[in-house]
Amino acid sequence: MTVDSSPEAQPESPPQSSLGTAAARNLATTTKSAPQMQEITSRWLLRTLPWVETKGGAYRVNRRLTYTVGDGRVEFIQDGAGVRVIPRELGELALLSGFDDVEVLTAIADRCVQRDFRAGETLVERGAPAEQIHLIAHGRINQTSVGKYGDEVAVAVLADGDHFGENALLDADARWDYTATAETGGTLLTLSRADFAAVLSSAPVLQSHIRQFSALPQQRQNRHGEAEIAMSAGHTGEAALPGAFVDYELKPREYELSVAQTVLRIHTRVADLYNGPMNQTEEQLRLTIEALRERQEYELVNNREFGLLHNADFKQRIQPHSGPPTPDDLDELLCRRRGTKVFLAHPKTIAAIGRELNSRGLYPDHVDLGGQQVPAWRGVPILPCGKIPITKEKTSSIIAMRTGEENQGVIGLRQTGLPDEYEPGLSVRFMGISEQAIMSYLVSTYYSAAVLVPDALGVLENVQIARTR
């Protein structure tokens, strides 16, 4: 049996007897949403920072005079597989802090010997003679020692730019009081006591510097390196009281307000004819301001001048003990400062924290923050911040900070009362209409951030966030 499929055999569609939907929509009012934007995030950093009015466009952080020296990281030059230390970077060592004779520093740098190490290799043994300083160019090194009850305890985790064994350069009887083991493969440079002594013997200017350095500990200071305030306590009778004054830094740091700007352009025909039911100028301005606020938060995290990641004190930067962000790492980050108000981490890092907690049978607390339940550790909220970068090795950082001027914490800086101010610290200025009938608006926001004392901000660096099998 065959079926005739010719056009003549197809049944005819009935004629249209009512108005079609396509034509009817031409007369209908469409229900529509406001313009949407995928770039908008929660911007917790901007919401949690206390904003301080900054008149004159700059904020000066006055601190007590500090004698702490040489707590920085050493930088290197990589030439293929070879690594050399930058001579001036040797000034980051406490022993050479403030020493600026480039010729002598170069002679010391030339005597540094490269050493490549592999994961699991023991670099120094506890109790062995210490005869050289080690400068870590790349890799992670774990320092361990013996605890009070004979068990092995962790001392520190060192990474790129750190160094250890500096006391070996001048002390002929120095011995290692810890064992250093490589957690990853890497490269370090070593400088022996003999090589340093050879340079020292031929450089009178370095000898003079070493003598001055040896006199530094005579300057009384507290455990934070600040000039000590002399006082007496527990005395009786008419004891003579010591005189005291609080010395200040002579050149305190000033934070100048940064700026993010853009020019918003709108054709007058669009603004005149297509303004209903939504104001085109207002919607364009709303989305532009959202983009500026996103850029503002990115700069507060990553800017090399005032960004949080670059302004954390070196003593407040720690390394995870095993790679992933464990509860022990979060506790160590917490103990570095009083009154930590908030953790900031990339959402993927927060997921890694959750995995580590779950693997140990732990579950994070939740706290109420502005009517929203957020995860917390030890009562400190862990807030997402997608502006914290993730490296190609799938590592990231966790920021912990104390906030507020009254707490000597981290503060945001802005200036209000700007001409044509649209929001606090943000102005929208009309720039005129061009010959092409295009209106222009200059949209500007001014901001910065300041760390009032070093322990207000801490960073857990090189956190492994990739899922392990």
Image (spheres, rainbow, N blue to C red):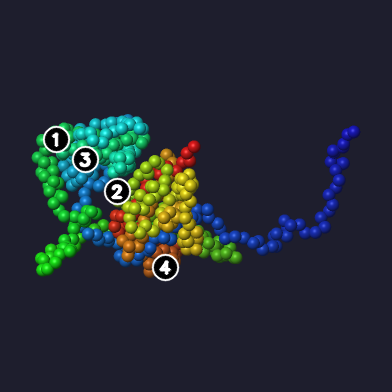
Q: Which residue was labeled with disc 3? A: 166
Graded by Cα atoms within 10 Å as few (under 14), some (14 to 19) or many (20 or more), the crowding at tag 3 reads: many
| Circle 3 SS class | helix
Comparing labels 4 and 2, the label whose residue is closer to the camera: 2
Q: Residue lying furthest front in this view?
A: 149
Q: Which is more toward the observer, 390 or 229?
A: 229
| Circle 1 SS class | helix
Q: Which is more toward the observer, 135 or 122?
A: 122
Q: CA distance from mark 1 to mark 4?
A: 65 Å
Q: Residue at x 72, y 56 (%)?
A: 22
Q: Quadrant of the N terminus?
A: top right
Side (left or right) of 6 relative to 266 = right
Q: Which residue was labeled with disc 2? A: 314
Looking at the rendered structure, the kind of residue marked 1 is Ala
In the image, residue 197 lies at what x, y percent? Answer: 14, 35
Looking at the rendered structure, the kind of residue marked 3 is Glu
Graded by Cα atoms within 10 Å as few (under 14), some (14 to 19) or many (20 or more), the crowding at tag 4 reads: few
Q: Is residue 176 above or below residue 308?
A: above
Tell me the tag on residue 197: 1
In the image, residue 466 lies at what x, y percent? Answer: 46, 41
Does the image show residue 216?
yes
Graded by Cα atoms within 10 Å as few (under 14), some (14 to 19) or many (20 or more), the crowding at tag 1 reads: some
Q: Residue at x 38, y 67 (%)?
A: 416
